[in-house]
């Protein structure tokens, strides 16, 4: 149930068109326009599409066209570009869409639109076939700081045309001065209404003004690019070793390859001719930040990047360059900040440093290992959720051959956050998901092979998983894996699928002969080993013979499988996502439940499953809410500014709202106190607050209407997702909760793991152990673990008992929601509850009183004397029983809400009133009264506590089962989500109505005493409001009663002093044991409520003495007592109003 | 179920799928390397996903061809494990005798296998890195710091044989303490597994490649029924939530 809920919830966030990377808006049902925009142009998550306009880009005619070059000849092979209109007299024209974001101006021939009215298909047009150009198509992605000047051109027509001069922070060289050539002037003709054009230009103007600040960053970033060094001089000229000002020119760091040699034979790879072509291309089309993408750009990438430019082009095409532009110092700062710190991730990284591409010389050296260590470590710091995953070491090691460590760091961020979403997460759900996607693509595109595989029980993913996880790097020989990477960074994740499918297609026949995993693997292994060999060794045609297996593979991948688009992948991902996550979650759940330690054995698997679900749902939901709130906050903050120019921190801005879901790798596994309260509120009724702070809906008249209002409020609440408690009931705040939390938090780390929760609940829920429960409770209040609970503690215990019971108690044998569903309106039910509550109330009051009677003074001498209590209880009891004769008035007898703040659990922590002191000396019963004297500290011990509990049937039953039953786990499910459901409530009521509480027949009638509630019903308070109204108050605000407990202590004392020894008269109606008649009685009681509850302390004592003596005439005494109580009642009622 | 071993003539051969599970860096890959190549590498590349190797094991009455899936040990790879132990007839659950936490992890794996893997799977509990303990091979103690988790300085036994043995008995597991480094007990483990595999659960030799005449002779009916068998298991596996 939890899972399906979660899946549904997750689905809300996941659109079919989900693309890798973050969804910026937690409420989005589909990727936001911003997300799509970022994805198309590989921009950082801070960028939003602000303006867009159709435009025509004109580039100056090439001076020396590439048309004669070998790469241009391949144009046929890669397919002509639809948008390439070719050159005419004036230059090259591209029609497309011009976009403006906060910091970027992007032009693409892929006609996407991100205006708010644009359809999803218009916004995600780039996810279709890309014809080798990547998602951004032909065009440019200019950081605004790279725009040096914009001129409005005078045109003959009405056209609105701009001429844009770009630079990357370095002035171009000229005839007189060496330097890289100036990037091309871009002429852009805007096609739109005059107004549209003006608006766009205004936006651009603002952006440019802001952009000036970034120039320094850009200069630093560009200086790291090899192109900047490379283009400084002509290709064939020997690069000068100094600049005109005499400073030496040194090439930037181009990875370990420059120190340890790049893999492969550079001659065979035709590295030099590639470099020449790139030199030509960049001379015409700019470089690094100013580069313009024309079809040749994409072709040059397809044929494989030259060693020295590879890193830079990876940065550029993946967009990690833009990330670096935004935070050029993040890498260095991260390392510095965490210098000397350790973490689990770092331990794991250390283990693998020596085992990453160990065959490459660079990684046999301290230099290479050091770089690898630093990049992995830095990333583990900025993305602690991912930390470190094996396979990252291999990928980063590969990147470091071509990139400086600084560059590799940003590229790793892009990889993990955008290109390989979830691959390296703690559950690796992305990896598993893409395996499923891959399998389904195989099934679709190669049904025969698929049949064969499944027929022979060969599991494809065991073979293909490493391909994806380590980007073919440890599957193919390095030089070929890098070729795949070249295209991968340009075109995105679909490339991994295309190549994978092509591998299977090319080896189809042999694979059809393989009938087990082993054979299957060995076919592919040997194929990878032959990638460099000729694909057609026997061909007559030398040109055919020259085609390597790898080239053939690329053709198959990008020709035959060019229908595998980003869109395809996204669709497949969303189709399989739920199932994959569910599998992971059930696995995680199984594992987790097994790991819960020995205590967990006390709970049923169902219960453990329930706790697990509940625990993680809370964490998940809290996280969701936090994110929504955060997003809201951000939005407000943004709105309050004119322009969001501030760069929000965080490298990739990965704000995926899905995080926290177990399958996605829970970002937290610990519950803080607030989460704990929320957790309990869903498990136990008493943990739900009585006075929900519902400022969220001040207009809701029901919000403060007592119990009914409470539930109304709950129902109204879901419309306020911003409530800190979400949809669930608002948890109560009470000292008891804090104590429980503290007790469960064994290691004192101020948070609970699931294991803590289970270990905490197990002793309560597991097994009906009344003694255990009593000790558990006692220990909760034994702050210093000395086996004693002092006066303050006694009061706190009583208060807690009232707190726990204020929605009713699960009496003996209650299995279901007990009388807790009470107060909901149904009259019948109300009555029943009342009686239960009354009982409990009196039980507690009696408990307090007796606690003090039986308390041991802290005096050692007296203590020794009292120790006898535990040894010979019966005797002692008898003894005390006599003494206690005069104690007539129950401390609670007059208790009515005293107006103290419900949420204030400090009520009882006030120093005891001095009235104790005043009255004490007059006491005739020094022994008993000494206990009440704050001046003579007392305590109770566990045996005393136990005895006192067992002496009272209500309490006994509470500890026997009521307390345990107040936690509703799987076996009596009461998930928070259903608490608010009216149908559930009524069902619970019915259930309750038809299931009267069982009780323990052998024991005397409920250990209630005095007539607290009865008093109210006796007519002092108008009947209509009377009992009912008062109970409402009690239930709404149990704490007030508790406060009253203390207040009444004084009065009890006074009465003692007065010697008004009227015994409370017991009410024998209240016979829990009489199960059969109970229903009937309840009805009567509702009217006669008065009489029901009165029961003196003494009667209880007696019943304790002779337990079987159930029928004790109590009626009369009850009446006598009643009057007295009534008086009290009136007083306090008046006080209250 | 499959009756492929009844053929006469040369020793019947059957393949057995074996999966290795255990905490990271307890020496799973090293055990396999020792068993398959009789080799030991101090710096073994971490396993990504899983590695696949095969090795034959000669028993007096038959030949067992182990198809070994050596899985990645890093915690997060655990969710991939169901993919690998699916249909496995045997499992080697490895822990490091110098690292008590690895035994805890091993116990989890055992529980997972008993609940989720093929019924009747033969599980061996293996405490590796015996070479690091003085008591067993005093001359070969921990002077090499190559142990991947780098515990050499406190490389003493932390998990007593008795404790592990007791656990293994309780769960009816085979139990061995091994050293992949010295080779101590390594082949014994595999042989014991081979012996423990009930004949009835043996598939015929799968795969035309290298199966030779044996496959042709004994394969026929056997393979057919094994296929049915496997499919049935595959369904069950899919249901039980292998993530792939």
Image (cartoon, rainbow, N blue to C red):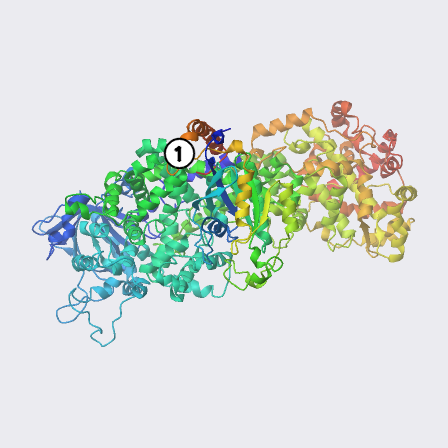
Give me the residue at 75% from left, 22% from top: A1080
Q: How many marks?
A: 1
Q: Nearer the viewer, residue B139 or A248?
A: B139
Query: How far from the left and from the top, in percent, is residue A1069?
Result: 81, 27
Residue, far left: A89
Q: Nearer the viewer, residue A660 or A1096?
A: A660
| Host chain of mark 1 | B
Query: How far from the left and from the top, in percent, is residue B5?
Result: 49, 31
Residue, far front: B9
Apparent side of residue A1059 relative to residue A783 in the rendered image (left or right)? right
Q: Nearer the viewer, residue A452 or A1105?
A: A452
Q: Is residue A608 above or below residue A155?
A: above
Callout 1: 10 Å neighbours few (<14), some, many (20+)?
few
Q: Which residue is mark 1?
A: B213
Query: How far from the left and from the top, in percent, is residue A493?
Result: 33, 45
Res B155 seen here: yes
Q: Quadrant of the C terminus of chain A?
A: top right
């Amino acid at each position: 149930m939890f899972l399906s809920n979660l899946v549904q919830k997750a689905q809300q966030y996941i659109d079919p068109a989900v693309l890798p990377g973050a969804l910026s808006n937690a409420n989005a049902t589909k990727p936001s326009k911003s997300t799509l925009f970022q994805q198309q142009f590989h921009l950082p998550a801070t960028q939003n599409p602000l303006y867009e306009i159709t435009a025509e880009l004109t580039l100056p005619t090439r001076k020396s066209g590439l048309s004669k070059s070998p790469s241009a000849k391949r144009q046929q092979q890669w397919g002509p570009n639809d948008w390439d209109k070719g050159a005419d007299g004036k230059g090259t024209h591209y029609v497309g869409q011009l976009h403006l974001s906060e910091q970027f101006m992007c032009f693409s021939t892929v006609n996407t639109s991100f205006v708010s009215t644009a359809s999803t298909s218009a916004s995600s047009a780039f996810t279709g076939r890309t014809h080798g150009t990547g998602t951004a198509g032909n065009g440019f992605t200019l950081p605004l700081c790279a725009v040096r000047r914009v001129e409005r051109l005078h045109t003959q027509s009405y056209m609105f045309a701009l001429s844009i001069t770009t630079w990357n922070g370095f002035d171009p060289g000229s005839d007189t001065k060496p330097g890289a050539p100036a990037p091309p002037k871009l002429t852009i003709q805007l096609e739109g209404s005059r107004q549209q054009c003006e608006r766009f230009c205004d936006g651009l103007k603002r952006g440019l003004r802001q952009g000036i600040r970034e120039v320094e960053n850009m200069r630093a970033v560009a200086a790291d690019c090899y192109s900047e060094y490379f283009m400084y001089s002509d290709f064939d000229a020997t690069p000068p070793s100094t600049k005109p000002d005499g400073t030496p020119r040194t090439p930037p760091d181009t990875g370990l390859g420059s120190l340890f040699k790049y893999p492969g034979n550079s001659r065979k790879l035709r590295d030099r001719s590639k470099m020449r072509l790139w030199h030509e291309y960049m001379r015409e089309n700019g470089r690094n930040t100013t580069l313009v993408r024309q079809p040749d750009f994409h072709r040059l990438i397809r044929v494989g990047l030259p060693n020295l430019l590879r890193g830079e082009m990876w940065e550029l095409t993946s967009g990690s360059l833009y990330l670096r532009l935004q935070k050029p110092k993040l890498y260095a700062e991260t390392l510095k900040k965490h210098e000397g710190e350790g973490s689990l991730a770092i331990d794991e990284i250390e283990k693998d440093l020596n085992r990453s591409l160990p065959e490459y010389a660079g990684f046999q050296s301290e230099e290479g290992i050091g770089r690898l260590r630093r990049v992995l470590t830095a990333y583990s710091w900025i993305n602690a959720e991912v930390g470190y995953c094996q396979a990252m070491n291999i990928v980063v090691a590969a990147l470091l051959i071509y990139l400086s460590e600084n560059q590799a760091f940003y590229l790793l961020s892009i990889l993990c956050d955008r290109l390989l979403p979830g691959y390296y997460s703690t559950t690796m759900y992305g990896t598993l998901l893409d395996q499923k996607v891959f399998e389904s693509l195989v099934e679709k595109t190669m049904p025969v092979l698929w049949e064969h595989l499944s027929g022979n029980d060969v599991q494809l993913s065991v073979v293909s998983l490493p391909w994806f996880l380590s980007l073919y790097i440890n599957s193919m020989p390095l030089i070929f894996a890098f070729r795949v990477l070249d295209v991968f960074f340009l075109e995105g994740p679909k490339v991994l699928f295309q190549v994978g499918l092509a591998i299977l297609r090319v080896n189809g026949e042999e694979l059809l002969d393989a009938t087990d995993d082993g054979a299957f693997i060995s076919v592919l292994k040997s194929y990878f080993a032959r990638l460099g060999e000729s694909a057609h060794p026997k061909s007559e045609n030398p040109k055919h013979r020259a085609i390597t297996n790898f080239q053939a593979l690329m053709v198959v991948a990008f020709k035959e499988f060019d229908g595998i688009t980003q869109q395809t992948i996204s669709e497949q991902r969303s189709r399989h996502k739920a199932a994959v996550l569910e599998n992971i979650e059930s696995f995680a759940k199984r594992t987790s439940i097994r790991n819960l330690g020995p205590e967990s054995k006390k709970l049923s698997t169902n219960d453990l499953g329930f706790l697990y679900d509940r625990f993680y749902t809370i964490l998940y939901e809290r996280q969701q809410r936090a994110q929504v709130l955060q997003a809201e906050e951000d939005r407000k903050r943004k709105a309050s500014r004119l322009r969001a120019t501030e760069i929000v921190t965080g490298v990739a801005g990965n704000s995926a709202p899905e995080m926290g879901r177990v399958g996605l790798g829970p970002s937290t596994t610990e519950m803080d106190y607030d989460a704990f309260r929320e957790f309990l509120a869903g498990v136990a009724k008493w943990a739900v607050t009585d006075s929900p702070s519902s400022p969220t809906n001040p207009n809701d008249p029901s919000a403060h209407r007592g119990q009914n209002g409470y539930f109304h409020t709950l129902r109204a609440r879901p419309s306020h997702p911003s409530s800190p408690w979400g949809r669930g009931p608002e948890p109560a705040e009470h000292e008891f909760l804090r104590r429980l939390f503290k007790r469960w938090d064994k290691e004192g780390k101020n948070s609970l793991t699931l294991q803590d929760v289970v270990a905490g609940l197990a002793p309560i829920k597991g097994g009906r152990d009344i003694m255990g429960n009593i000790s558990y409770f006692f220990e909760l209040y034994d702050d210093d673990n000395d086996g004693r609970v002092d006066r303050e503690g006694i009061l706190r215990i009583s208060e807690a008992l009232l707190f726990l019971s204020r929605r009713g108690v699960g009496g003996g044998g209650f299995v279901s929601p007990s009388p807790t569903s009470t107060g909901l309106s149904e009259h019948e039910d109300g009555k029943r509850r009342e009686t239960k509550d009354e009982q409990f109330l009196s039980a507690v009051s009696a408990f307090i009183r007796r606690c003090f009677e039986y308390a041991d003074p802290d005096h050692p001498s007296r203590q020794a004397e009292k120790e006898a209590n535990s040894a010979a209880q019966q005797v002692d009891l008898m003894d005390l029983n006599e003494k206690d004769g005069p104690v007539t008035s129950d401390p609670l007898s007059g208790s009515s809400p005293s107006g103290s703040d419900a949420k204030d659990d400090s009520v009882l922590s006030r120093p005891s009133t001095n009235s104790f002191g005043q009255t004490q000396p007059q006491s005739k019963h020094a022994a008993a009264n000494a206990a009440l004297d704050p001046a003579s500290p007392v305590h109770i011990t566990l045996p005393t506590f136990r005895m006192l509990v067992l002496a009272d049937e209500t309490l006994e039953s509470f500890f026997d089962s009521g307390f345990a039953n107040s936690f509703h786990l799987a076996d009596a499910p009461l998930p928070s989500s259903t608490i608010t459901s009216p149908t559930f409530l009524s069902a619970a009521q019915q259930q309750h109505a038809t299931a009267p509480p069982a009780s323990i027949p052998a024991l005397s009638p409920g250990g209630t005493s005095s007539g607290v509630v009865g008093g109210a019903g006796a007519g002092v308070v108008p009947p209509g409001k009377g009992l009912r109204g008062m109970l409402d108050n009690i239930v709404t605000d149990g704490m007030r009663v508790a406060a009253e407990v203390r207040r009444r202590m004084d009065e009890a004392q006074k009465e003692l002093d007065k010697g008004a020894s009227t015994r409370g008269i017991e009410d024998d109606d209240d016979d829990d044991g009489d199960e059969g008649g109970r229903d009937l009685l309840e009805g009567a009681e509702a009217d006669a409520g008065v009489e029901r509850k009165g029961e003196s302390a003494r009667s209880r004592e007696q019943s304790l003495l002779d337990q079987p003596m159930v029928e004790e005439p109590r009626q009369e005494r009850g009446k006598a007592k009643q009057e007295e109580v009534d008086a009290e009642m009136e007083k306090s009622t008046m006080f209250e109003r | 179920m499959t009756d492929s071993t009844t053929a006469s003539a040369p020793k019947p051969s059957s393949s057995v799928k074996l999966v290795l599970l255990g905490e990271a860096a307890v020496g799973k890959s090293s055990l396999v390397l020792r068993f398959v190549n009789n080799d030991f590498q101090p710096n073994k590349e971490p396993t990504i996903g899983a590695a696949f190797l095969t090795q034959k094991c000669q028993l007096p009455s038959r030949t067992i061809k182990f198809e070994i899936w050596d899985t990645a040990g890093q915690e997060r790879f655990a969710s991939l494990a169901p993919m690998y132990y699916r249909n496995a007839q045997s499992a080697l659950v490895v822990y490091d005798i110098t690292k008590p936490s690895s035994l805890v992890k091993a116990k989890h794996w055992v529980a997972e296998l008993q609940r989720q893997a093929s019924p009747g799977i033969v599980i061996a509990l293996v405490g590796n890195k015996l070479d690091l303990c003085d008591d067993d091979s005093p001359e070969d103690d921990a002077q090499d710091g190559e142990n991947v988790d780098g515990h050499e300085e406190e490389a003493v036994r932390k998990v007593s044989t008795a404790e592990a043995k007791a656990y293994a008995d309780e769960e009816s597991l085979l139990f061995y303490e091994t050293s992949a480094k010295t080779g101590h007990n390594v082949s014994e483990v595999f042989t014991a597994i081979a012996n423990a595999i009930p004949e009835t659960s043996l598939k015929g030799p799968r795969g035309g490649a290298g199966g030779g005449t044996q496959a042709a002779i004994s394969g026929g009916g056997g393979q057919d029924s094994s296929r049915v068998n496997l499919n049935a298991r595959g369904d069950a596996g899919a249901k039980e939530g292998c993530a792939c």
